[in-house]
Image: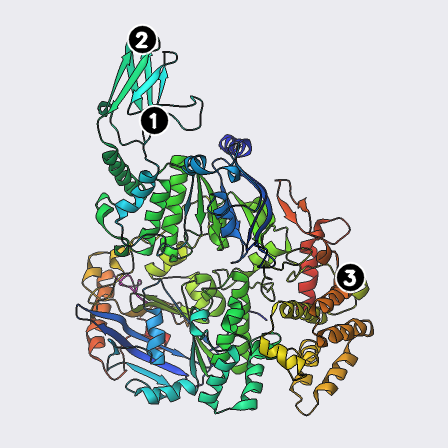
Amino acid sequence: MSQQRHRQRTEAAPVLTVENLRTEFQTDKEVIRAIDDVSFDVHPGETVGIVGESGSGKSVTARSIMGLVDDPGRILDESSIRFHGEELVGKTESQYRNVRGSGMTMVFQDPLSSLNPVYTVGNQIKEALRLHQGLKGKEATERAAELLKAVSIPDARRRLTEYPHQFSGGMRQRAVIAMALACDPDLLICDEPTTALDVTIQAQILELLNDIQEAEDLAIIFITHDMGVIAQVADRVNVMYSGEFVEKAPVEELFANPRHPYTQGLLQSIPGRGDPDERLRSIEGDVPTPHGAATYCRFAPRCPKAFDECESIHPAHVDVGDGDVVHTAACLLYPDDVPQEEALDVHRERESPAERTADGESPLVDENTPAEEKQ
Amino acid sequence: MTEVIDREETRLEAEILVEVDELKTYYDTGTLTGDPVKAVDGVSFDIRRGETLGLVGESGCGKTTLGRTLVQLESATEGRVVYDGTDVTELGGKELKQWRRNAQIVFQDPESSLNDRMTIGEIIREPLDVHDWPNLTASVDGVSDATVTGDANRASDPSGRRDADIRVTVENGATDVDVRDSLPLDGDDVTVDVDQSGTTPTVRVDVRPTKAQMRRAHVRNLLEEVGMQQEHYFRYPHQFSGGQRQRIGIARSLALEPDFVVLDEPVSALDVSVQAKILNLLEDLQEEFGLTYLFIAHDLAVVRHICDRVAVMYLGNVMELGRTEDLFEEPGNPYTHSLLSAIPEPDPTIDKEPITLRGAPPSPRNPPAGCPFSTRCPAKIRPPEFDHLDPDTWEAIDDLVRIVRERRRAERSVRERAREILGMETRFSDVEEIIVEVFGSPESQTAANVSAERAFTDVLDSLPRDMRDPIVDVTEHLRENDEQAALERLLDAFGSECDATAPDFHEVDTGGRVSACHRHEPEYDGVAETLRQRFDDRTIR
């Protein structure tokens, strides 16, 4: 097993397409634009990573896709989330339930809080099987034991009769993954699935996810704040900051050639990479809470490279990759092969129509746009 | 340059601040609760003055308990913790309280370690109030046997570790007063009267600010010291982010000017960019105040960055201890190997094959008899008569051992016992199935038309001949619900030195690094060599 797969993106249709996703939380005091204009797609068999600090909107992105955003949150109308081509935005709760059962599922960070402490693990897996596959009785027990075996839990038959507290942390997360597999998913959203676990257990879970992915040709959205984990599991990475994607690139490209100042800062603040005697570089300040649509760069207050225009122009995604590599960053420093004034014009131009577009025909460069867009 | 390093090293070699000797901390030691939880099970090491000793290990390995025992938040079951010549496990009452000024702790979770109903100022001030800070001390030079009266007490031991707060020098009738820098006092806040008329001279020290004023000023200084502002004094914890809360926790731990600080996962709850800031702060504070740290963490990258030496813990025992760089570059113990190999590198081009450990650490209530790591060890010594078995079979045997161990732990409910007595099927009755699951090929498990007994005999037949007897015996024992006998039979057949005796420490490099593993003994192959053999074989196959 190698964690380093250089998967080619398949020509097949994407499993999931997210376009111009905007999620807002309206409270009496203020409106928080937790997700602002996020677009990406996921193809069968690939892992798309979303990485960022806490409070950057990673989990809200996942919950928006799963239809789990509760009042006062709502997904704005021009957003589009298509699963196998089927539009999910605007579905009622019961319609959404069918989608969740038929191939889209999620694994949460804390396995203890996603399991019910008063039911046996077997009971909970069987519940998922009953709801999603209509299995009952002996048949369901058989299948549940198979699922536990599939996630490498030894002595599965006995384990089915145990309660979550009798499982170790890693074993619980395996059980949660088994429940997720019960609905035979095409898309698995993992929201920090290994953050609560030790490194040796984390390695087991990552290996397991990788094996399952290879066996089932599963598409995975992997959310984490750990750059090390992202480097191992993801094929493509989206760096998220304050509700927006600020950089998108294939994983090797992102680590070898980070272009957005935020990504650069994130990579530099990882300890143990450079000389241990050197001080760690850090990013000043905290992730701001985004209110309403941005007319400026949200990272500007913390950015070491910020200049005056960063306060007045909202950066759009521009191509920063070499040759065929699909690599975009939303920063006014780019494109860096033209004079700065011209580069700023590119962003100014793109900003205004983007805010108005409602039909998904975004003029922003996203990863679907061919690389020759440059110049 | 070399001179500087030399000096630093001699300083590190020179003085031992904390000496931990065969320390054990057990929980549930009552007679009714059965076996105690052996959280820390016989640990010995030294911490030198001014160094940062890292303590790493998986959750549940006892590192936090050890840290808490060092600052006497837990009482040791056995063993000694010698701090600067005093065994602190023996201290009690007033002495213990007095000693606590020297040793402080920063907790992991900044959300729960600050009282939400107190202001930041009150939180940091609390230790000062508890210890009636500043208990000023004065030393008097130039006059012998002077009595100190007023706001200060005579410094007990002029050569003591702590400098006196106020130094009075009497020379030719003139008095010179020197106030320690870190106190919030100016020269003119202190007045000193020397009265030499009596039989013994009397030195009267008067300090203008009240204790409360001094404490407030000290808290304000501390806030600035940890990178916050004085205005934050009257705010509440909920108004601050995780990183700022951790700074407050650090300020509180430094309030009594300790020498030794236990940092219990101080950055684990923080984002990486915030984490970098706190690590930098901790390094600055160490330099400024000459602190000694015990840095507890599970993040090895953080440990590598900040620690001078590292102790790797597993199941209440220290497995390896040595200089950080050496330990990371060339790990000695199999557990250190596995731990390092499990860290995800933030570099997608590194094509490393991780040694993935199977299973989870055993319960500290029933640790294995021999080496604590023997249940998961990737380099475990195997009996030579079974040399011919392939890696998959070994993996299966190890799995079976873990399952039996696990079953021994699992208690039966009343209902299950009743079913057992009535001869009905219970969750413990599917022994054959377990053997098929563990040793069978994938095909034998999916073949639904084969009966359970048939599948079992097929699997048994497929095993090498010398393995069959022990496996049949184990199956018998399990069927009789005698897991203990089954485990003994298994270890008797497939176990080795690792299951029988706990390994001793062996020195593994010239820098004094020690590692506990039977593989360091001359009659066995080395750890790195074994791992290379076992894991390369695997990729070739």
Nearest the viewer among B509 and A237 is: B509
Q: Mark 1 falls within which chain?
A: B
For the residues carrying marks 2 and 1, which lies nearer the camera in this image? 2
Task: Specify which label sits upstream in the sequence, 3 or 1.
Answer: 1
Q: Is residue A163 left or right of residue B370?
A: left
Amino acid carrying label 2: it is Gly
Task: Specify which label sits upstream in the sequence, 3 or 2.
Answer: 2
Q: Residue at x 67, y 80 (%)?
A: B421
Determine which residue is flagged by label 2.
B198
Residue B108, position as x, y percentages in the image: 41, 53
Determine which residue is flagged by label 3.
B383
Amino acid carrying label 3: it is Pro
Residue B150, position as x, y percentages in the image: 28, 22
Residue A102, position as x, y percentages in the image: 43, 88
Q: CA distance from mark 3 to mark 2?
A: 85 Å
Q: CA distance from mark 3 to mark 1?
A: 65 Å
Determine which residue is flagged by label 1.
B165
Q: Secondary structure at mark 2?
A: loop
Q: Pointer 3 and pointer 2: residues touching (CB < 8 Å)?
A: no
For the residues carrying marks 3 and 2, which lies nearer the camera in this image? 2
Q: Secondary structure at mark 3?
A: loop
Packing grade of label 1 (10 A; few <14, some 14-19, many >=20) is: many
Residue B10, position as x, y percentages in the image: 54, 31
